[in-house]
Image (cartoon, coloured by chain):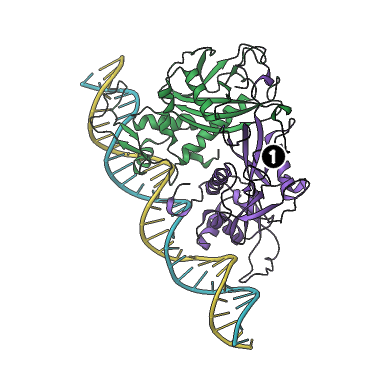
Chain colours: A green, B purple, C yellow, D cyan
DNA sequence: CCGCTTTATAGTCAAGGTGACTCTTAAAGA
DNA sequence: TCTTTAAGAGTCACCTTGACTATAAAGCGG
């Protein structure tokens, strides 16, 4: 509603205040594995445990603004670079006891990063690190749940959107794009079929002029593509086994 | 993060407090039209305008709990009935100026109601009314945006989940189920093809034993079905024209 | 009582998308 | 040079889907 049911003369300060924070599930694909950006907690509760980066929403900020600011701080990337990254609201976590110290409502975001720049903690930020998904222990607070929700959401959106290109640099090969799907879904995809699907979907990718990149990798050099105009996939690219998210 | 970056000795009350509310987009299908539950505002701002029902999250509540409580209050339905309804977090709206009086962060929910019970305002609730979607003027605050987001989300989820049954009573005909799709999507679907798709998707619906319902409507009486075990549709039931959400 | 309308339900048929494969090309590495 | 690896072209059968036709069973207006 937006406080339209508040009694007349309602004083905001009379209520138990809610702290509002953002939590970020920053994901990338590196070396054929899904990686997450995590910070190590220095103080109680959960001292020494890994946690998702995040912070308070400041009085003048929207949650989106706060999330992008935190993303820049934690990754050490420039604001201009961060402005181009895919950042999307995931869900809001509001369980009353999710933080033992006080009532904290957290708006969680998912961010997708192409190349994996090793984060250099900017300012007061605790050092953030890329960790392979699943190799960290239990995360602090309800961050295990948030991270699992983010993974599930991203996996589902790969099926019916062009989101996968958000994991790739501006120019990429179809092999790199396929690697995104295989890594997030944890399956192997048939190369020719994947290629056919991507190329026949209008607006998914567009070929880059010029010669194929002279790759440093093995095998025949691949052609380069850029992300296309399309945002959704019709029909979708369903993951094998017909298994739901 | 959950306040893990708060300076030591941080006092919650020193910050500008955020009020946290829930807003509900309660949808139903009645007489071949999508309807929304709205309340008329009695006070400024937006006095006289229609708004989504909602209210404050109380100190001991999660947003989900608050949403279900508000849903019961506004519809006049019993808590037991409301417990069976589909209620799902939509998105959180955090623009600093979305409420001119104070800083309000609102967690929006989408609720799907089968039969359209005329709401009887319980307690202090302003009288809520079912309005055909789109016939109301501009809603208060950013509720137009919330409602549009809810509509879009529901339309998209009809494609790849079994959500449509949430609009139907416990036992329903395939015609009623098809009506849900047609109403939410605003298209006409081919009856035989829709029937085939639903019946060949394992777990979407299950036939009810006994004779077809002796309907009061025209035409051949239809068989009754219940919602099945499945929650997702693989492959999905895509809307015509291949148009994205 | 007799068609007419309406809705449910059973089929048919062709086009398109997909999964499973094969084969060729072009690089790197031993 | 031979092997390995990956890109990229192409084939074929199956399944799903969209478009349609046909039949059954109710209510309704004369």
Task: Please state if A230 lies on the left or on the right of B47 as rendered.
Answer: left
Report whether B103 appears left or right of D16: right
The residue depicted at 72 percent of the width and 38 percent of the height is: A8
Whether residue B105 appears in this view of the structure is yes
Q: Provide the chain ID for the residue under circle 1.
A: B
Q: SS class of the residue under badge 1? A: strand
Residue B122, x across and y down, in percent:
77, 48
Neighbour tally class for label 1: few under 14, some 14-19, many 20 plus, Cα within 10 Å: many
Above or below: residue B115 compared with residue A53: below
Residue for badge 1? B55
Q: Residue at x 58, y 25 (%)?
A: A59
Front-most of residues B51 and B226: B51
x, y (%) of residue A40? Answer: 57, 14
Please identify the quarter of the rendering in which residue A221 is found: top left
Q: Is residue A186 visible?
A: no
Q: Is residue B34 left or right of residue A96?
A: left
User: Position of B7 compared to A25: left or right?
Assistant: right
Identify which residue, B131 or B40, lies in the foreground.
B40
């Amino acid at each position: 509603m937006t406080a339209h049911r508040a009694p007349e003369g309602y004083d905001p300060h009379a209520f138990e205040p809610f702290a509002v924070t953002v939590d970020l599930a920053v994901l990338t694909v590196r070396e054929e594995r899904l990686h997450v950006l995590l910070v190590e907690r220095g103080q109680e509760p959960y001292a020494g445990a890994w946690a998702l980066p995040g912070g308070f929403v400041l009085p003048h900020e929207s949650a989106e603004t706060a999330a992008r600011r935190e993303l820049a701080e934690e990754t050490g990337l420039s604001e201009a670079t961060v402005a181009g990254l895919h950042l999307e609201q995931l869900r809001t976590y509001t369980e009353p006891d999710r933080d033992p110290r006080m009532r904290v409502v957290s708006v969680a975001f998912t961010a997708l990063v192409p190349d994996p720049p090793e984060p250099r903690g900017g300012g007061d930020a605790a050092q953030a690190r890329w960790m392979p998904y699943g190799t960290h222990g239990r995360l602090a607070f309800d961050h295990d749940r948030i991270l699992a929700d983010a993974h599930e959401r991203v996996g589902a959106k790969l099926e019916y959107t062009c989101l996968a290109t958000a994991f790739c640099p501006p120019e990429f090969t179809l092999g790199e794009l396929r690697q995104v799907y295989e890594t997030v879904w944890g399956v192997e995809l048939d190369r020719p079929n994947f290629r056919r699907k991507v190329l026949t979907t209008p607006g998914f990718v567009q070929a880059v002029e010029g010669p194929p990149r002279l790759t440093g990798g093995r095998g025949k050099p691949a052609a380069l593509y850029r992300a296309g105009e399309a945002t959704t996939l019709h029909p979708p690219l369903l993951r094998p086994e017909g298994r739901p998210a």
